[in-house]
Amino acid sequence: MNNILKSVRAKRKVLIVEDERINREILGNILMKEYDVVFAENGRRAIELLRDDADSFSLILLDLMMPVMSGDEVLRICKSDDKLSHIPVIVMTQEEDAEVPSIRAGADDFIKKPYNMPEVILARCERIIELYEKKELIDSAETDPLTGLYTRDFFFEYIRRLKKYNDVRMDAIVMDIEHFHLINEIYGRNEGDRILKKIASLITTELGNGYGIACRCSADTFYIYYSQTSDEIMFVERILNGMASTSFESAKIRLRIGINKNIDGNDPPEQWFDHAKLACDGLRGDYTRQLAYYDSTAHDRQLYHERLIRDIDSSIANGDFIVFYQPKYAVDGDRPVLRSAEALVRWKHPELGMISPGDFIPLFESNGLVQKLDHFVWEEAAAQIAKWKKKFGAAIPVSVNVSRIDIFDPELEDRLIGLLNKNGLSTNELLLEITESAYSDSAVRLIEVVNNLRKKGFRIEMDDFGSGYSSLNMLTTIPIDVLKMDMKFVRNMLRDQKSLKMCELVMDISRFLDVPVVAEGVEEKAQLDVLKSMGCQIIQGYFFSKPLPAEQFEELIQKEAELFAKNF
Ligand code: C2E
Ligand code: MG
Ligand code: MG
């Protein structure tokens, strides 16, 4: 590195500040061979020369005792002036007592008067210049030239060091500018730079009030490591106000800010900021908020969901989704009779274990992936019905769940009819469950689709009835064949009058519509008895059986067939 430094500027310029002419000449002679030497006979002149061309000087040799302005004063001015403080100062002194106060004032080294060891003086000058130039080079990699904030690498390096010596609790804050690339494109880079500098200067001012460090991590992203003892809300507000009160060409600058308050000292600092960045990125396009906190449970949930989304295809291909069957019993005769079943999907994830539909169905409904899964379940169920039909002579009807998104699929009807044809089934054998909320969300389209399906002979069960806020008016025009009472009324019917009343209401509506009711979620004999007394004819619930794998469900069919044979 020394050679590189030397080659940058062949001869360094050195300022000798000394009031005694003889001393100036001796020193000048010593240094002249190696350096461009400039002289000042007092402090004031020295400051003039330095301010004139601060960047050209590599070193100041400073006498302390001088008229007009003392060396101490020169030192003080140099070290408190941003433009001069980078020039190293060697103090020339006769008294050793002067050394300590000079060091405190910022002197870098000493040369003893009288000047009778020229080699030592040259060596000291050379070493100090070298040290400073190296430091400057390091400083330039430490800070971002545009904003003066740290660069990303140095920022994290400093955090690692701070972490070692400091047990103050800190926050990780990430700040970025919405649509910054557009600002650059529309208003030009200079305007973009102005905005970045303004943000950096507001951050720097704030860090002066609290405790922390900051970097510009990438074009428009700032990372701030900020003490928790300082108020982060005030911090953010002052920056937002500072931006709001500055006029920019691009009138509206919108900052997004993500804060991670629960940083774990065992995790790498980069991760603290990744998490704050996640919170920050979550605000993209959200014009109601500018600040979000990182929440680890929300993040875990998000990761879990991402995992499920990633794995759905391979799991369908590998047979990790399994269709279970839950029986529905007719209870209007002397004994319960197995009438039909509902196909319910289960996910036997190779690494996460058994996952309940409650965890993945709503997720896949929200992103449309449920359609793939439904198609798989319908295929499986149809093939299974055909198998049982062949084995037992008569089919046991199975209902499958049809999601909202399926309704909007123009190929729905063809697909279902294709399935029936492929497996030799009739529309009485593959039943369709559609949740009530789908009806209230998109009534017109849904009624049209359902009408068409019914014209083809399909039978439609309205699932979760009572939860979807269908209007009574709509109910009278709605095309359905069965009502499935929402499970929560059954769950609470023995404890809570309101739920009991709801069950009665559903029964009344079913009579009005002239369709049977399936009560789901029946777990106890007492529930069954009350429902029966209300006129409910079909029961699905743990009281009879949980959803079962096909082989176990087959045992129920077998038993039913034997009972049937015995009774006739
Ligand atoms: P759902 O269609 O209303 O299905 C009934 C749910 O009630 C099933 O939950 C069933 O196991 C549960 N259940 C039945 N009897 C009882 C009981 O006595 N007590 C209790 N506590 N629960 C009972 P499951 O299998 O967890 O499914 C939950 C929901 O996930 C289903 O509600 C349905 O909306 C959805 N789902 C399941 N499989 C599929 C599918 O293949 N496609 C679609 N689109 N949705 C499905
Ligand atoms: Mg259902
Ligand atoms: Mg249901």
Image (cartoon, grey):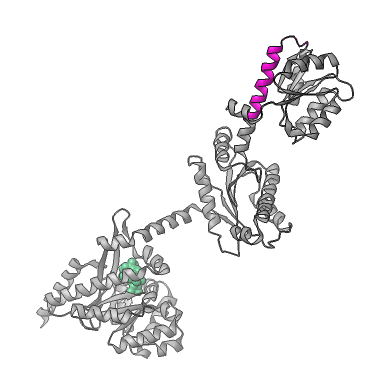
Number of numbered discs on residues: 0
Residue 78, picture quadrant:
top right
Q: Reply yes or no: does residue 129 show up in magenta.
A: yes
Q: Position of residue 9 (x, y in %)?
A: 66, 30
Residue 372, picture quadrant:
bottom left
Q: Is residue 107 visible?
A: yes
* Viewer-nearest residue: 412 or 28: 28
Locate residue 25 relative to residue 306 in the image: left or right: right
Locate residue 121 relative to residue 220 in the image: left or right: right
User: Relative to residue 491, is residue 14 depicted above or below?
Assistant: above
Residue plotted at (51% across, 50% down)? 275
* Viewer-nearest residue: 74 or 552: 74
User: Relative to residue 17, is residue 362 depicted above or below?
Assistant: below
Residue 320, picture quadrant:
bottom left
* Viewer-nearest residue: 356 or 29: 29
Residue plotted at (44% across, 77% down)? 498
Q: Quadrant location of the N terminus? A: top right
Is the stretch drawn in magenta largely helix, strand or loop? helix
Locate residue 365 relative to residue 342 in the image: left or right: right
Q: Reply yes or no: does residue 385 show up in magenta.
A: no
Q: Position of residue 444 (x, y in %)?
A: 44, 85
The magenta segment is: 114-134
* Viewer-nearest residue: 123 or 80: 123
Q: Position of residue 175 (x, y in %)?
A: 60, 52
